Amino acid sequence: MSFINSQEEQVKRMSGHSKFANIKHKKEKNDAKKGKAFTIIGREIVIAVKEGGPDPANNSKLRDVIAKAKAANMPNDTIERGIKKAAGDSNSANYERMTYEGYGPGGVAIIVETLTDNKNRTAADVRAAFSKGQGNIGTQGCVSFMFDQKGQILIDKEECPLSSDDLMMLTLDAGAEDFIEEEDGYEVRTDPADFSAVREALENAKVPFAEAEIARIPQTKTVLTAEADINNLQRILDLLDDSDDVQNVYTSLDGELD
């Protein structure tokens, strides 16, 4: 675990390198499509319950999904119904995780994570999105090596009851690898194995978060300047967003599309 050696050095890491603003913007865009967001989370609940049972106290993956659902403003009764349905219906759909990798225009690396009960349908949707946006799907692993998988928790400054220093110490003590401060929020990064412990420490301290998930963070970013490339990448992302099977999309794009 790569702890920062001192608080002074940690503060120096609080620069503008966080993706908080971009991901928060993406989340706000997704809020306009709560139906899809809730569908995705509902599928994650099914998988978590089938893998570890319906009791959140004994199922850390289910606790993580519940936290994600609450961050997305999913009503508690909807969450509870989803858990009960998954636990009581042995014939409920069997969702599979499928990951697609490739390149968009201008060499932007793209990873698409899906949850699906129909692999053929999902593969067709993803391939069509890449094709129509002048991108190319590659083989498994062709771009994933360019991303780090990290627990990522985003906290809005306006909603945080703790000072920056207290929040930093809380998260580092709980096992976080990195704490990054931006103008409007904080980003906490963890090893995936420590994600649940850090998230639960924040919950116990009554710290709300805008987003909490295991994310893929690009090691380097790709700048697009050509209008055609920007428009084509936007088309790929829009088409992927239209598919209920698509769970997450990660890119190496430097910045955020409108």
Image: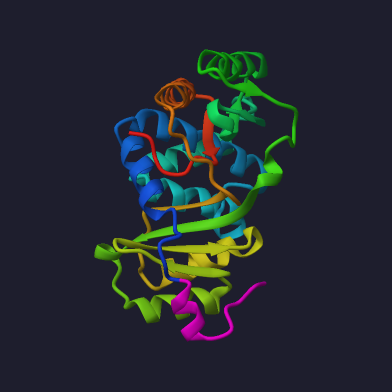
Residue 251 in percent (x, y) is at 54, 38
Looking at the image, can residue 103 be seen? yes
Residue situated in front as seen by the camera: 72 or 239: 239
Residue situated in front as seen by the camera: 36 or 228: 228
Residue 37 inside the magenta-drawn segment = no
The quarter in which the C terminus is drawn is: top left
Q: Is residue 253 left or right of residue 72?
A: right
Residue 230 occupies which quadrant of the picture? Answer: top left
Q: Residue furthest front?
A: 226
Magenta range is 1-13
The quarter in which the N terminus is drawn is: bottom right
Q: Which residue occupies 45% across, 30% down?
A: 39
Q: Is residue 165 left or right of residue 218?
A: left
Q: Is residue 2 left or right of residue 139?
A: left
Residue 155 in percent (x, y) is at 37, 61
Residue 130 in percent (x, y) is at 56, 19
Q: Which residue occupies 40% across, 62% down?
A: 16
Q: Which residue occupies 24% across, 64% down?
A: 158
Q: Is residue 43 above or below residue 238?
A: below
Q: Is residue 52 above or below residue 112?
A: below
Residue situated in front as seen by the camera: 56 or 182: 182
Q: Which residue occupies 36% across, 48% down?
A: 24
